[in-house]
Image (cartoon, helix red, strand yellow):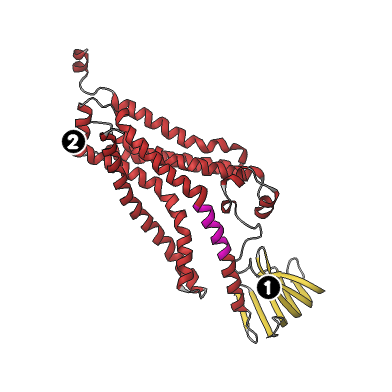
Amino acid sequence: MPRIDRYILTQLLTLFGFFALVLVSVYWINRAVSLFDNLLNDGQTALVVLEFTALTLPIVIATVLPVAAFTASAYGTNRLSGESELVAMQAAGLSPFRLARPVLVFGITVGLMVAVLVHGLVPMARARLADRQAEIAENVTAQFLRPGSFQYPASGVTLFIRDIAQDGRLLDLFIEDARNPLSRTIYSAEEALVVRADTGPVLVLLEGAAQNLRLEGTEPRLSVTRFAEFSYDIGAMIGGRSERGRDLRDYGTLDLLDPDEALLAATGASPGAARAEAHERIAQPLLSPVAAMIGFAMLMLGGFSRFGVWRQVGWAILGLILVQFLSNAAANQVGRNPGLWPLLYVPALAGAALSILVLWLAGRPRGPRRAREAAR
C-alpha cells in the first residue's frame, strides 16, 4: 500500500477508535441502566447485572460500528481538507476516486468487524442471554414459593401455599387467575410440583379442581372441573421464555441458511423466515463501507468556503439517513414476506451507487464556464 494510503487509513482508524468508544459507551450505559433497575428489582446480585450487561455488549457494538465509521470518515475528510492536505493531494494529480481507495479499505475493515460480530459473537451472546434469563425467571419463581402467605407473582394472580414438604412437594396450593376481567379461574390442589419446561418453570397440580367464572353475556356462568393432574405455566407469566420458544437470532448463520426440523420446532418459525434472518446478517456488514464512502464522498463536493463544510455535512447525514431508511423498509417488507429477502441487499447497492455518483461529481472540473471553455 502506498504511503499516502497508509497515512489516510491511519488517520481514519484512529478517529474510528475514538468515536466507536464514545458511541458504544453512551449506548451501552443507556441500556445498562434499565437492565440494572430491572435485575435489582428482582433481587439479583451485582455479578448477575455485570454478566447481563457484558452479554449485551456485542449487540451494542454491532449496532454502533457503522455509525462510528461514517463519523470517522466525515470528520477525517473534513480535517484533511481544513489542513489543506486534500488540496495538496489533488494538486498532485490524485482524483477523488483515487483518494477514496484508503477510505474503501477502511470501510471494508469495519465491515469485517461487523461480520465477525453478527455471525459469531452476537448469536452466542443472545443464546447465552436467553438461557440466563430463563434461569433468572426460575429463581424469581422460587422467591414466590413461600408457604403460609399470599403471594402476587403477576398482576391479577394470587398464589397461596400452606406448606412445602422436605422432598419439595407443595401442599394445599391455591391459585386465583384474574388477569382476564371476563373470565376468572381458581385452581386448588392437594399437592403440586415445580417442573422445568421449555417455556420456564411449570406447576404440576395433583388431585385438584378448577373453578371458572365467566362474566360474558347477561348471566355469569360457573363451571367446575376436577382433575388428577394439571399443568399451570408460571414461567411465561413472570418473564420466562415465550410460548414460541427460542429466537431465530440465537442461532448461527449457517444453521439459518439450511434450517433443520429441530431449529424450526424450537423457534416456531418457517424456513423462509430463517433464511431471511441469515440474509439480513449477511447484508448488515455491507452497510459499513457504504457509510464510510458516503461520509467521504459528500465532503469532497464543493470548494473552499468561509462558512465551512456544514452544507456537505448535511448532505452526508441525509445520504446516511436515506440508506438507513431503505434498510428499515426492506427489513419490514421481508418481515411480512420472507421470500423478498433480495431486498435486504438493495440499501447497500443504493448507497454504493450514491457514493460513485458523488465522487464522479466531485471529480468534474469546477470554476466559471468561460474559464473551462478557454482551457479547452
Q: First in sequence: mark 1 or mark 2? A: 2
User: What residue is at 27 percent from the left and 42 percent from the top?
Assistant: 76
Q: Position of residue 274 (x, y in %)?
A: 62, 46
Vertical placement of 20 versus 81: above or below?
Answer: below
Out of 324 and 192, give the one closest to the viewer: 192
* Residue 77 highlighted magenta (yes or no): no
Q: Position of residue 248 (x, y in %)?
A: 60, 51
Quadrant position of residue 232: bottom right
Quadrant position of residue 86: top left
Circle 2 residue: 84
Quadrant position of residue 342: top right
Residues at circles 1 and 2 in contact by the CB criterion of under 8 Å:
no
Q: Which residues are magenta?
A: 121-132
Disc 2 secondary structure class: loop
Disc 1 secondary structure class: strand
User: What residue is at 56 percent from the left and 65 percent from the top?
Assistant: 133
Q: What is the quadrant of the N terminus in the image?
A: top left
Out of 67 and 17, give the one closest to the viewer: 17
Crowd tier of the residue under label 1, counting other residues whose Cα lies within 10 Å: few below 14, some 14–19, many 20 or above: some
Vertical placement of 218 versus 188: above or below?
Answer: above
Circle 1 residue: 177
Q: Mark 1 to mark 2: distance in Å?
A: 72 Å
